[in-house]
């Protein structure tokens, strides 16, 4: 049987964490491991927002130096250079830590950066960038940087597909990593937090927050059963990503400044020849922003991302026709030899980045920040903005340090205090690819991993749907395997299958599937950056 929902009515916690994305689950794990009584609440499923919709790259930080005329730009704006150095150092540290702690989820690739005679980024810019990265970051895993200047076909099997070969000056190559399944990484982190003592409530919404007698009182509503509960906590961590402002506004108190600027990133997935196996490609697209071709599962590769302002409901956001056409156009500009068209798009996905709002930066600020809302009349409430998936381990530690400074060291015992490296490897364990006993994997997702629907089974916990759109018989197999365990009637089982197929067709649409005609896919008139 699936686990019973945690009964929390009337309980008093040290910390209430709102949002079970990668940073919320990481924070909960660190907090409970440090002895704080912790409740993790999520209105949807694990990784239901930006955590599962990222570009999935565990990058070395070179992108922070990628700007047109970087020497001139950084000379005129020294603080921007200092910020780029800081973010690049953090990226190198996160790359080393994550690749070491969860190698199963971090696949090494050879990243290639083609440099042309007319490129705004020169070859010596990249050389200088890697000198800086070696100086500021860990030595392992190695960057393995080199720059090819001839015999491209001998070293790069796909080189014939690159544009303007007569203008190609060099190709920089280096080791990079792709996180093949960030939503599963989030599931494992949340389950580990639960195993070592955190209370967990998925599909449960915090509908109100009020300050009373030096604590926060939160009203919770189970979105499946409608059951209401009230808990109290000395600290509230608003880790709701794109929904941070809406959660913040549920508290009784004065209006507070906006924290989030959302930018939408869309991707297209296509099948590429074996020549691309083990490689990725990075460049700046014609709008001057980073653009990638990266491997996913099997022979699936994806191109992206886009970058457009988004000011709607980020739930179930999808790629628009304009997004798809832009991505195909940029893919063909990078690799005209592929001759991609809309019929080659296997599926798409899109997410909304919860960047830090800054009136001076219309597209948001990308630096990870923790906001103490005491100055806005909310003592004991903190929010994190712009925290990427790749740095979630340090994000968890940083937010735990903030809580310790506010509350003092925990008075509660924890078997995991001071053992973070071991803590990262406990729990249900990092999921391997789905076993040949698929029904058993489906049932396990419900019985021990809190899955409540087919989306949670087929995307988040087994990853089957990330390999391409599933046929009805595959979805029916999963539904049939879990229907008794989940308590679904025959009618409910059919409805769940149809709901999943509809979700797959609209949210992870192909180029031939119709666009959703609702607010979640509305663009605000922006062009691609």
Image (cartoon, rainbow, N blue to C red):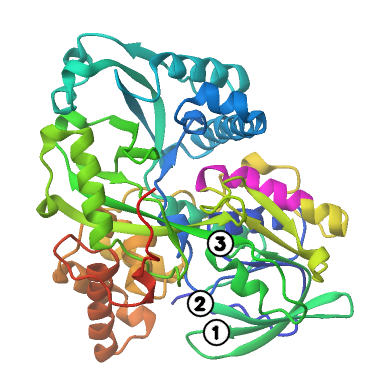
Find residue 395 and report its horizontal and vertical position in percent.
Answer: 64, 47
In the drawing, what numbered circle is on residue 222? Answer: 1
Where residue 238 sits: x, y (%)? 66, 65
- Report the side of 487 relative to 505 (left or right): right
2 or 3: mark nearer the eye = 3
Q: Could you say where residue 215 lies in the image, as x and y percent from the top left?
A: 83, 75
Q: Magenta segment range?
A: 389-401
Say which mark, if any, is on residue 241: 3
Residue at the spot 49% in from the left edge and 40% down from the top edge: 102
Q: Is residue 354 magenta?
A: no
| In-image side of 130 versus 401 (left or right) | left
**Disc 1 to disc 3, C-alpha distance:** 20 Å
Instruction: Name which of mark 1 and mark 3 comes first in the sequence.
Output: 1
- Image point 34% across, 32% down: which residue? 282
Circle nearer the N terminus (2, 1): 2
- Mark 2 sits on what residue? 203
Looking at the figure, which quarter contains the N terminus? bottom left
Q: Is residue 398 magenta?
A: yes
Tags 2 and 1 touching, CB below 8 Å: yes
């Amino acid at each position: 049987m699936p686990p019973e929902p945690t009964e929390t009515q009337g309980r008093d916690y040290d910390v209430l964490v709102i949002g079970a994305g990668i940073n919320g689950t990481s924070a909960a794990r660190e907090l409970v491991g440090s002895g704080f009584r912790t409740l993790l609440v999520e209105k949807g499923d694990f990784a239901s927002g930006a955590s599962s919709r990222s570009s999935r790259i565990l990058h070395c930080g070179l992108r922070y130096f990628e700007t047109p005329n970087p020497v001139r730009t950084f000379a005129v704006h020294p603080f921007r250079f200092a910020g780029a150095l800081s973010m690049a150092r953090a990226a190198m540290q996160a790359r080393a830590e994550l690749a070491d702690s969860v190698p199963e989820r971090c696949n090494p690739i050879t990243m290639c950066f083609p440099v042309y005679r007319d490129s705004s980024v020169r070859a010596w810019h990249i050389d200088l960038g890697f000198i800086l990265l070696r100086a500021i970051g860990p030595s392992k895993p190695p960057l393995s940087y080199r720059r090819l200047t001839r015999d491209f076909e001998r070293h790069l099997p796909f080189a014939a597909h690159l544009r303007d070969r007569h203008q190609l000056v060099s190709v920089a190559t280096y080791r990079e990593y792709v996180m093949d399944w960030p939503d599963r990484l989030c599931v494992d982190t949340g389950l580990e937090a639960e195993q070592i003592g955190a209370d967990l409530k998925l599909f449960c919404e915090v509908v109100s927050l009020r300050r009373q007698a030096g604590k926060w009182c939160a009203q919770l509503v189970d979105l499946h059963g409608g059951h209401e509960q009230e808990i109290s906590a000395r600290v509230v961590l608003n880790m709701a990503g794109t929904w941070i402002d809406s959660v913040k506004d549920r508290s009784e108190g004065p209006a507070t400044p906006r924290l989030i600027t959302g930018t939408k990133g869309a991707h297209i997935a296509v099948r590429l020849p074996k020549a691309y196996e083990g490689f990725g490609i990075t460049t700046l697209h014609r709008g001057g922003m980073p653009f990638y071709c990266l491997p996913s599962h099997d022979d699936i590769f994806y191109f992206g991302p886009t970058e457009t302002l988004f000011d709607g409901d980020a739930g179930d956001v999808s790629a628009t026709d304009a997004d798809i056409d832009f991505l195909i156009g940029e893919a063909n500009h990078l690799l005209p030899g592929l001759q991609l068209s809309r019929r080659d798009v296997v599926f798409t996905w899109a997410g909304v980045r919860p960047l830090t709002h800054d009136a001076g930066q219309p597209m948001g600020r990308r630096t990870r920040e923790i906001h103490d809302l005491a100055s806005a009349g909310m003592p004991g409430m903190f929010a994190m903005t712009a925290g990427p998936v790749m740095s979630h381990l340090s994000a968890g530690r940083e937010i735990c340090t903030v809580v310790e400074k506010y509350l003092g060291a925990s008075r509660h015992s924890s078997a995991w205090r001071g053992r973070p490296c071991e803590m990262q490897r406990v729990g249900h364990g990092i999921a391997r690819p789905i076993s040949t006993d698929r029904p058993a994997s489906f049932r396990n997702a419900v019985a021990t991993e809190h899955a409540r629907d087919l989306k949670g089974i087929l995307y988040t916990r087994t990853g089957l749907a990330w390999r391409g759109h599933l046929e009805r018989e595959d979805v029916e197999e999963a539904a049939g395997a879990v229907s008794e365990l989940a308590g679904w009637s025959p009618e409910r089982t059919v409805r769940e299958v149809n709901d999943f197929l509809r979700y797959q067709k609209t949210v992870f649409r192909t180029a031939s599937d119709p666009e959703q005609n609702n607010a979640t896919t509305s663009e605000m008139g922006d062009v691609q950056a």
